Image: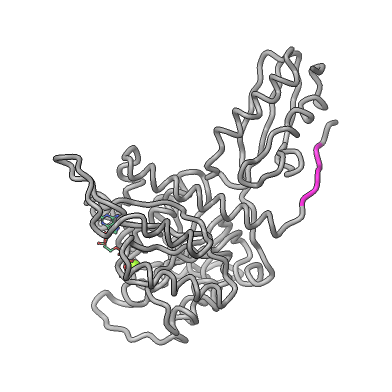
Amino acid sequence: MSEITKEAVVAALSKVDDPDLKKDLVTLNMVKDIKVDGTTIDVTIELTTPACPLKDQIQQDCINAIKEEIPAADKINVNMSSRVSSSAGSKLNAILPGVKNTIAVASGKGGVGKSTVAVNLAVSLAKDGAKVGLIDADIYGPSIPLMLGIPQKPKIYQSAESEKMMPLENYGIKLMSIGFLIDDSQAVIWRGPMASGAVKQFMSDVDWGELDYLIFDLPPGTGDIQLTLVQTIPLTGAVIVTTPQEVSLIDAKKGLKMFEKVNVPVFGIIENMSYFIAPDTGNRYDIFGSGGGERLAGELGTKFLGGIPIDPRIREGGDSGKPIVYGIPDSEHSEKIMGISRNLAAEISIKNMSNSSFGIEIDLG
Ligand SMILES: Nc1ncnc2c1ncn2[C@@H]1O[C@H](COP(=O)(O)OP(=O)(O)OP(=O)(O)O)[C@@H](O)[C@H]1O
Ligand SMILES: [Mg+2]
């Protein structure tokens, strides 16, 4: 039991762990502000991502710990803020200076819903308050502009210092697409160097500003073009999308091996088209089998970030340029996707923390 002092609040918060980062909030330097006014205590905790899946739990843990340490406090406000941690290695810093993390969304097999997942993850992270960009690097079928409801091409923006392209924006997401470089009807035969040249241009010639997460939708497959791309982009890590069926899982495994080969960490596996619930009967149908994504993650020693069922509303969201997490936010599917994006954000924070050193610096003055 302690008096109501800042020191006592620090002592209380040093008993609260971030369950993902597995250290206490004081050691993690997440306690940003403590105010004591009579019997009222105000605390600000700064998380490493606004999409923290354990935000509410950590907040409640703080309140409980303070109550226990300082029973005389009668009003405790724990304010949750965030500043996204950065993976910024020298390569990322040099090419994309304002960008904290870059994530490739990949799949071995085509048509598994990679672009749908990329768009919905981007919207989810933005809804949680992160600054998000998206690069559609799919040379075979750039589909993100349609899915994000941005049909027009970007203009060249003139400024005194630079002549950079401004990314287009919708739902708070900045977008560049290989689709902006070609006409819909124009057949383009890309080779690896051309594709990586275009993606390089998106990184150096586009004014991205400050971004917490920049997501790349890669072309499907694990051939030369994909390999060239993942070597061109300074990647924080990748996620692999698969359906539960065997042919897709085999290709997902190849995808994971490709990232291993170029030393890009894989944050986890997302299973799409996991099952279908018939709206009339409520019966569940495992159209592509069941549990494959989770099994594969276990086998490959990576995380299972979550599964997304088949639902016509997810397809309609893509076709109409209104991703389901934006268009039907209260649906069970949107909540599932939000959960997956938070799991991903947590994995990124964990990785960034394991690469950084941190110190204790709380101003008690
Ligand atoms: N969970 C889902 N429920 C219903 N339809 C879906 C779901 N996920 C994706 N789709 C639909 O399946 C089709 C393929 O999805 P998408 O274009 O996202 O796949 P992709 O892996 O990016 O394909 P590609 O390999 O051609 O780039 C799209 O019409 C999309 O709307
Ligand atoms: Mg696609």
Residue 79: quarter of image: top right
Residue 332: quarter of image: top left
Residue occupying the point 28% across, 58% down? 289
Looking at the image, residue 293 lies above or below residue 181 = above
Looking at the image, residue 331 lies above or below residue 307 = above
Task: Give the camera-side residue of 22 and 164.
Answer: 22
Magenta stretch contains residue 26: no
Can you tell me which quadrant of the image ligand 2 is in?
bottom left
Residue 302, image x, y percentages: 52, 60
Q: Main secondary structure of the magenta part?
A: loop
Figure coloring: one colour
Residue 100, image x, y percentages: 61, 59
Residue 186: quarter of image: bottom left
Residue 187, image x, y percentages: 27, 83
Task: Give the camera-side residue of 149 and 274.
Answer: 274
| Image quadrant containing the N terminus | top right
Left or right: residue 30 versus residue 252 is: right
Residue segment shown in magenta = 358-362
